[in-house]
Amino acid sequence: MILRHVLGVAAFAATLFSAPLRAQEPADRVDPFIGTTNFGTTNPGAVCPNGMMAVVPFNVMGSAENLYDKDARWWSTPYEYHNKFFTGFAHGALSGVGCPDMGALLTMATAGELVADYREYGSAYGDETASPGYYGVTLSKYGIRAEATATLRSSVERYTFPGGKGHILLNLGEGLTNESGAMVRRVSTTEIEGMKLLGTFCYNPQKVFPVYFVLRVSKAPQAAGYWKKQRQMTGVEAEWTPDNGKYKFYNEYGRELAGDDIGYWFSYDDLSEGEQVEVRMGISYVSMENARRNLDAEQPAGRTFDAIREEARARWNADLGRIRIEGGTAEQQTVFYTALYHALIHPNLLSDVNGEYPLMERSGEVGVADGDRYTVFSLWDTYRNVHQLLTLVYPERQVEMVRSMIDIYREWGWMPRWELYGRETFTMEGDPAIPVIVDTWMKGLRDFDIATAYEGFRKSATTPGAQNLLRPDIDPYIERGYIPLGYFAQDLAGDVSVSHALEYYVADAALARLADSLGHEEDARMFRARSLGYRHYYDKEYGTLRPITMEGTFLTPFDPKAGENFSAAPGFHEGSAWNYTFYVPHDVEGLARLMGGRRSFVEKLQRVFDEGLYDPANEPDIAYAYLFSRFPGEEWRTQRETRRLLEKYFTVEADGIPGNDDTGTMSAWAVFTMLGLYPDCPGEPGYTLTAPTFDRAEIDTPQGVLVIERRGEGYVDRMTLGGRPLKRYRIGHDELLGAGNLTFELKNSR
């Protein structure tokens, strides 16, 4: 049921009869609660497209009694759909990631006596509702209505109190990962500023960085001050309340407080019934002064909560409205627009309104962007489809992101793999910036420094392992054409040599394509030859890729199913041999020959789907369904499997994403698949076609409006491109955009 989260019949009716009716807009077809359980790790918080700020309900902090899942406390998201224990709004949170980070600067409204322990001040809640750029909830314990909306770099919360005594809390001691270190300073009666240390993504303790904030309340409090969780100290003038245990409250105004487990409170004694207090926050990763600049620029005096909410909604409608669909069911339209919404959250802005941003891996140093600087480059995920979607529909943003990646190389000396707010987390494997930038370049977006990019690519593809931060196991990869077990183990994943090598093959295939484009013929031959090294891993006995030992023999014993469901297995990262065997998108036909030809390849690939060996919750096999279409006469299998996968794994429920959304990657798969095309080879400027979900889709592109039409039901019987018959199921990017119209005629039989 789509409309699960409403304010109640009376409130809904009041809204219906007090506001003019308006035609349904794209934002109306987004359900932000999709993907908020089953480890989808999305959240229903307020955010603008690719915005720095995300203000997100925090409900994964509490005891086993008030959490749906006690393990949810260790989730990588501030929010889990089934939990009903609200402990505040987090600011600057991530969406769809697999490791905890961010999710700090927690603001909370309470009533009654002042309490600083979240276990005591947290509240059950109801009447929860969310839409793009807005979130609202009623705190049952207090009768407070809490609402939030956002601009690109700031947020505003509105709290409607029942009357009497109320408080606004800023908790700097809690969050998803609880890094030590924060500071808060009183600026005026209604304004505070400070910072909080973040980082440790995927348990990487050295990758800590600060977020700075400025917070303002709309009403002057009767009292305000600081708290710190600690033993009672002597020699400090303070009000100590034994009932609050270890939380010490400071009423003194003219001071600041630094340390761990600290916070700030504003107290009101005379709130009238229904009185509203607003909390506005600006953030920056450069300085408190920039946080103030961001807040002042994006929330000038006189801008109301409702005006900012409508501005956020307008931003979403403008972005979502670049693709207009007709037909399909209401549920399918909701799945589509929610997936597009999720794909437009990351990467997000890092630069402030004055262009300043923290330089990559250079603590305390600041750069000035020429345009926008982006961050949260979860490239192991997004290189497969998110950036291709941005290139197709949001090219101006994709160019800025490519420029950001190239600037990261200039500042740090390496391209990013999984960059987070100016720090490289080294999460997952591979050299994924290569296919992203090559794909962008080959599709005609060229307003960036490709020479510097190529320099960075060649550095990571040729530097010996001892000095190579991106490919530390490159030496045997170059010398043998593969990486043996036992040579290198990365982070918490263990020995994942086959997964590493497969990522390098894909990157080198893309790099060969770029070298050709730039006239580097010798490099092109070298990198193309390297990209075919996957053949070393193919084992005829099992018909899968198989890890190789240091001695050059296949691993024994061997189970190609080992590693499924994210269990550990030698050679493979978060998957089994079946999840990786077909991941050779740059040489599918060559892999088929290794397997004994087309029939054997197709039968084996079909077995993956028929026997439940396909894992939609991770990326290596995300394009498997499209591989059938590489072989004439088998395209119907792609159409059948893509339809099955959409129906099974993408729904309008809270678990309607097949596991971790990976900063929009799963969602981008759904967007492309429902449109009827998919970029199944990163770095290759083309698409494989499948039967679309909708009768008509209009897509705004740099070359004009691309129209995709479907007539009939079932399997593809006939296609036309630009009005001319189309026999192929793989088409080039320029070919598609140049034609302007792609039509599918379907029939029930195949």
Image: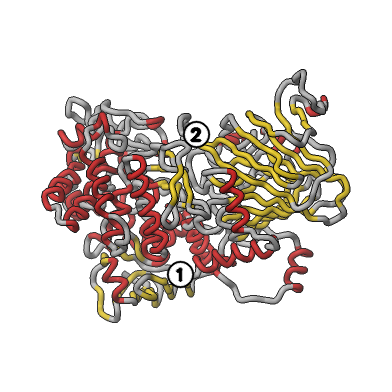
385 vs 271, left or right, is left
Residue position for label 1: 323
- Tag of residue 208: 2
The x, y position of residue 84, in whole percent, is: 69, 44
Q: Is any atom of residue 681 visible in this view?
A: no
- Amino acid under disc 2: Val
**Is disc 1 surrounded by few (<14), some (14 to 19) or many (20+) residues within 10 Å?**
many
Element type at marker 1? strand
Q: Counting residues from the N terminus, which is met first, the one under dot 2 or under dot 1?
A: 2
Total tally of numbered discs in the picture: 2
Instruction: Residue at 56%, 62% (x, y): give it.
Output: 30
The C terminus is located in which quarter?
bottom left
521 vs 66, left or right, is left
Which color scheme does this rendered protein use? secondary structure
Instruction: Residue at 32%, 30% (x, y): give it.
Output: 495
Element type at marker 2? strand
The x, y position of residue 297, in whole percent, is: 59, 58
The N terminus is located in which quarter?
bottom right
543 or 663, which is in the foreground?
663
The x, y position of residue 436, in whole percent, is: 32, 53
**Is disc 2 surrounded by few (<14), some (14 to 19) or many (20+) residues within 10 Å?**
some
Instruction: Residue at 15%, 56% (x, y): give it.
Output: 519
Are the two marked residues, 2 and 1, in contact with CB atoms closer than 8 angstroms?
A: no
- Amino acid under disc 1: Ile
